[in-house]
Image (tube, grey):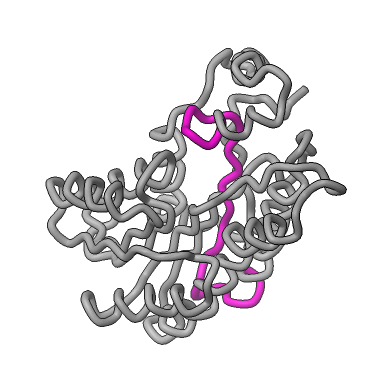
């Protein structure tokens, strides 16, 4: 146990993909965790795995797009661990469909899950961080914040909003709180395969994304987890209000 020893961390969307990898690495590094997901069965399996690494892990099932659920996450951290040091806003949905065909409810759900959830969790968490004179806010955004993708208007908009909100949080609450955004490119998780459904040939779209990186491969969830650990730990104590691309160089060209 090391870089996050004695830290209390909320990780949303921690039952698969990048969120799961982040939660696992944070547990290895000694963090007490509140993890979230919508699927109870999958959540319980991940909880069991994480508790094999570090006993202080709590699962809360629910929808991060709801304000009260985010309040509950903060209250759970305070009730069970007495404080809250870090929030990692990772849960996300794609909301596929072009602007003219996208159902209004899909647009709203995507913004609720991806963008509003960051606002809600920060709103309820930051007062307690300020009281303890320490806090880290970390959003798992995307290169979609800076690049358009066919059939992804809701997703791209929500990720751009995350980046803007992170900058706002860093500006308003520094120096006590640091806030940063991770912007992954193509990472081998279920989300990229769902995203590829917006293309005519999904399998080829994923292969092309891997070949388009300068490293000629997809990223792995563990790659993102290592960056998240760096930004959550004191190794990045002079970094705030920024975005860090982790995309294999795909945005260079």
Tell me what residue is drawn at x 78 percent, y 34 percent: 150
Q: On the picture, is 22 further left or further right than 151?
A: left
**Residue 216 versus residue 1 in the image, above or below:** above
Return the x and y of residue 90 as percentages of the image width and height.
49, 53
Return the x and y of residue 68 as percentages of the image width and height.
47, 79
Q: Seen from this angle, which residue lies furthest right?
A: 100
Return the x and y of residue 101 as percentages of the image width and height.
82, 46
Queried whether the magenta region covers residue 179, the answer comes back as yes
Queried whether the magenta region covers residue 233, the answer comes back as no
What quarter of the picture does the C terminus occupy? top right
**Snapshot quadrant of residue 131:** bottom left
Q: On the picture, is 250 further left or further right than 20?
A: right
User: Which range is magenta?
Assistant: 170-192
The tally of labels here is 0
Q: On the picture, is 219 further left or further right than 19?
A: right
Along the line of sight, which residue is nearer the eye, 76 or 237? 76
Tell me what residue is drawn at x 21 percent, y 60 percent: 57
Return the x and y of residue 147 as percentages of the image width and height.
77, 38
Tell me what residue is drawn at x 35 percent, y 44 percent: 20
Tell me what residue is drawn at x 38 percent, y 56 percent: 37
């Amino acid at each position: 146990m090391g870089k996050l020893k004695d830290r209390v961390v909320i990780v949303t969307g921690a039952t698969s993909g990048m969120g799961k990898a982040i939660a696992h690495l944070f547990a290895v590094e000694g963090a007490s965790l509140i993890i979230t997901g919508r699927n109870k069965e999958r959540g319980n399996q991940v909880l069991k795995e994480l508790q094999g690494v570090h006993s202080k892990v709590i699962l809360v099932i629910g929808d991060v797009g709801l304000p009260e659920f985010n309040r509950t996450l903060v209250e759970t951290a305070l009730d069970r661990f007495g404080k809250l040091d870090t929030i990692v806003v990772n849960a996300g949905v794609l909301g596929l469909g072009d602007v003219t065909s996208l159902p209004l409810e899909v647009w709203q759900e995507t913004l609720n899950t991806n963008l509003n959830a960051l606002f809600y969790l920060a709103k309820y968490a930051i007062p307690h961080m300020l009281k303890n004179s320490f806090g880290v806010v970390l959003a798992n955004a995307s290169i979609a914040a800076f690049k358009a993708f066919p059939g992804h208007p809701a997703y791209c908009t929500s990720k751009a909003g995350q980046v803007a909100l992170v900058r706002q949080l860093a500006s308003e609450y520094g120096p006590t709180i640091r806030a940063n955004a991770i912007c992954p490119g193509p990472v081998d998780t279920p989300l990229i395969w769902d995203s590829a459904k917006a293309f005519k040939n999904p399998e080829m779209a994923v292969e092309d994304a891997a070949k388009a990186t300068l490293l000629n491969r997809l990223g792995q969830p563990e790659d993102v987890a290592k960056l998240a650990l760096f930004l959550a730990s004191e190794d990045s104590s002079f970094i705030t209000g920024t975005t860090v691309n982790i995309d294999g160089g795909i945005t260079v060209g």
